[in-house]
Amino acid sequence: MTKGGALPKGSEIDIADLGSQEKYEEVKSSSKTITLRISKFNPEKDHASTFLEFTVPYQRWTTVLDAILEVKSHHDHSIGVRYSCRQATCGSCGMIINGKPRLACFTKISELDSDVVTVEPMNNFPLIRDLAVGFERMISTHKRIKPYIIREDSEISSGTKEFLQTPEDVEKYIQFASCIKCGLCNSACPTMAADSTFIGPQGLAQAYRYIADNRDQGKDERLRIIDEPHGIWRCHFAGSCSQVCPKGVDPAMGIQLLRGYLLGYRK
């Protein structure tokens, strides 16, 4: 077991700001600690995954990503992890944290209520290394449902400066526009675990986002795309996708509303 030393990057206390090593040691000694278990596996050379354990200090504001980067910076530079914005906007740092798909930068250690934090790569995604997974299939599926406004005209060709919407028009789709493509919903989906060709909750929710937008004219085209054996009808409505979304998107509801279009209940 490796013992952690420095405070996690991104915390409100930075070594450079403390002014002295003595002050830093004082702050470190007053911090609580957790055991951070990190899954390590390189498909190119390893036969099985293992867990490395590190004792890491944390403050009430320390996130799981802070702790991982602390370990990566000071103890094991080889740990593979994807991250970018560190403010739950880019969707890069999705992983399984204590058994649940979460964003590492959006998950505070103090809110996990556990002395042991276990981090693993997301389920239902091809593993690149350690905590980093490949998003190629999800992005390909996202593109397939045509995630943009489809119209026969445009503001320029029609002479209309803009296509206006009422607040009621926007309310029909706005929550689905908050998707950051983090993949947590796909990772939580039991159907994706059983059917690797399933479109998935992320793609289906985005199909609804554009179909529900009254500026869009591509409803029939998108419904044909998702109305297939491995499309919308493969969803068993477990609802786990909606439970893990960090942005409050409800893919399960979007899927049910899409079925309403296909069954003729909605127009």
Image (spheres, helix red, strand yellow):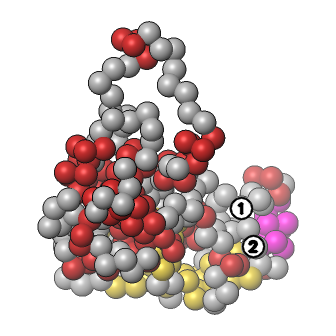
Residue under the image location 32 percent in, 63 percent down: 259
Q: Amino acid at mark 2?
A: Gln
Residue under the image location 30 percent in, 44 percent down: 219
Q: Tell me if residue 155 comes above or below residue 120 in the rendering.
A: above
Q: In which image quadrant can residue 133 be found?
A: bottom left
Residue carrying label 2: 59
Q: Indicate left or right for 86 with 123 as reference.
A: right
Residue carrying label 1: 11
The stretch in magenta equals 20-28
**Residue 107 visible in the picture:** yes
Q: Tell me if residue 111 comes above or below residue 163 in the rendering.
A: below
Q: In which image quadrant can residue 5 be found?
A: bottom right
Tell which circle, 1 or 2, labels the residue nearer the N-terminal end.
Answer: 1
* 24 falls in the magenta region: yes
Q: Amino acid at mark 1?
A: Ser
Which secondary structure lies at badge 1? loop
* 226 falls in the magenta region: no
